[in-house]
């Protein structure tokens, strides 16, 4: 019952998926979702690098959030 309280929503460093952390019987860790935790470490490292770049690229192609500027 009190386990519910410590659950948190986290984003996986490998696949960018949202997952609940500290779920019973789940392998998920603080940084990786259950799927990625089972991967070998070198593969996780590569995926984390790719994911980081994807997040950066997404930030760049997002239209800038200007506060209603007049032209
Ligand atoms: Zn993952």
Image (cartoon, rainbow, N blue to C red):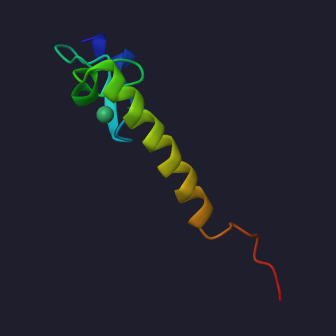
Residue 22, position as x, y percentages in the image: 31, 16
Residue 2, position as x, y percentages in the image: 30, 10
Above or below 20: residue 66: below
- Identity of the residue drawn at 80% across and 79% down: 69
Residue 17: quarter of image: top left
Above or below 66: residue 44: above
Extreme residue in the bottom direction:
71
Residue in the foreground of this view, choosing between 3 and 28:
28
Residue in the foreground of this view, choosing between 32 and 51:
51
Tell me if 4 is positioned left or right of 69 in this view. Answer: left
Extreme residue in the left direction:
25
Residue 8, position as x, y percentages in the image: 39, 25
Residue 50: quarter of image: top left
Q: Tell me which image quadrant ligand 1 sits in.
A: top left
Extreme residue in the top direction:
2
- Identity of the residue drawn at 35% across and 27% down: 44
- Identity of the residue drawn at 28% across and 20% down: 28
In this rendering, the count of numbered labels is 0
Q: Quadrant of the N terminus?
A: top left
Quick check: can you spot residue 60? yes
Quick check: can you spot residue 11? no
Q: Quadrant of the C terminus?
A: bottom right
Residue 37, position as x, y percentages in the image: 27, 21
- Identity of the residue drawn at 55% across and 57% down: 57
């Amino acid at each position: 019952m009190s386990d519910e309280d410590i659950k948190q929503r986290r984003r996986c460093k490998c696949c960018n998926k949202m997952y609940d952390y500290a779920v019973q019987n789940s392998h998920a860790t603080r940084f990786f979702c259950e799927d990625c935790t089972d991967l070998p470490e070198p593969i996780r490292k590569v995926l984390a690098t790719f994911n980081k770049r994807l997040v950066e690229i997404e930030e760049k192609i997002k239209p800038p959030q200007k506060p209603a500027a007049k032209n």
